[in-house]
Image (cartoon, rainbow, N blue to C red):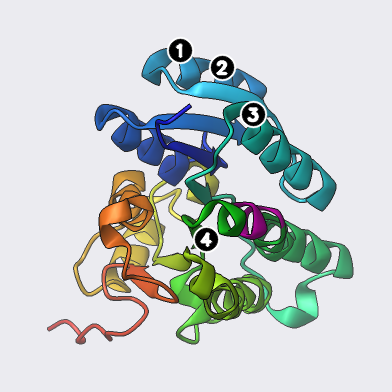
Amino acid sequence: MTDPIHLIIGATGAAGSATVRRLRADGVRVVIAGRDRAGLTHLAKETGAEYARQVDARDPAQVGELITGLADTYGRLDGVANLVGSVLLKPAHLTTLEQWEEVIAVNLTSAFAVIRTAAPIMARAGGGSIVLAASAAAQTGIANHEAVAAAKGGVIALSRSAAATYGGRGVRVNAVSPGLVDAKMTAGLIGNPAQAEASRAMHVLGRLGTGDDIAAAVTWLLDPRTSWVTGQVIGVDGGLGQVRTRPRG
């Protein structure tokens, strides 16, 4: 098969589903995977994406089997975006070891598993693009984000190191770094008007992000026309990661 093929892991989340829709609107062949079987089935029917399999991205063996099987089936793998994630807002002293391990598994272990399997496959074929999901919380100190910030900080370091390791063989590795996105996963953080307003006020652009905001950056990084972009962390965060808001009044 000669048409490029892209894999989106975590495809039913806000950023994942928006990325799938953007890629399919551009005629790109997309394979989708994640934990939500019903959501994947619906998204595949809606967009014409190809539903690979249900996969738990916390398990490196499942991620490895998914990526290896896809490359064997299609004879190529041009892009992978790992867009799984989780939210845990607790100070370190109130975070259990089980919660810590879960946050690391979802956010960092899944990203490592993608690099570990996809990068050498792409390198043998002459190149490709891998996009990982970081967070503005890893780039600026935000209270009660210790576990998530640590995991996403690891994703940033992983993406840069992998970009150096595999760049000479044509594999680009980048990360997107969102601020707070209005999504099912964050509903508990913005569940009432006061919480939502406080969250918006943290972002200098005065609004929360959307899945499509993140998808715009992901699809740009996957596009072969960005073939001279690697080792970058693209902040799609309303300014949260770098810019402080002015006090009102």
Identify residue for label 2.
41
Left or right, 193 with reference to 35: left
Query: What kind of element bears circle 3?
Result: loop
Could you say which quadrant of the image residue 183 lies in?
top left
Q: Magenta residues: mostly which secondary structure?
A: helix
Q: Residue at x 12, y 83 (%)?
A: 249
The alpha-carbon separation of the residues under discs 2 and 3 comes to 9 Å
For the residue marked with disc 2, what is the amino acid? Thr
Identify residue for label 1.
45
Mark closer to the observer (2, 4): 4
Query: What kind of element bears circle 1?
Result: helix
The picture places residue 106, in percent across and down from the top left corner, at 70, 56
Identify residue for label 4.
132
Q: What span is in magenta?
A: 117-121
For the residue marked with disc 3, what is the amino acid? Asp
The alpha-carbon separation of the residues under discs 2 and 4 comes to 23 Å
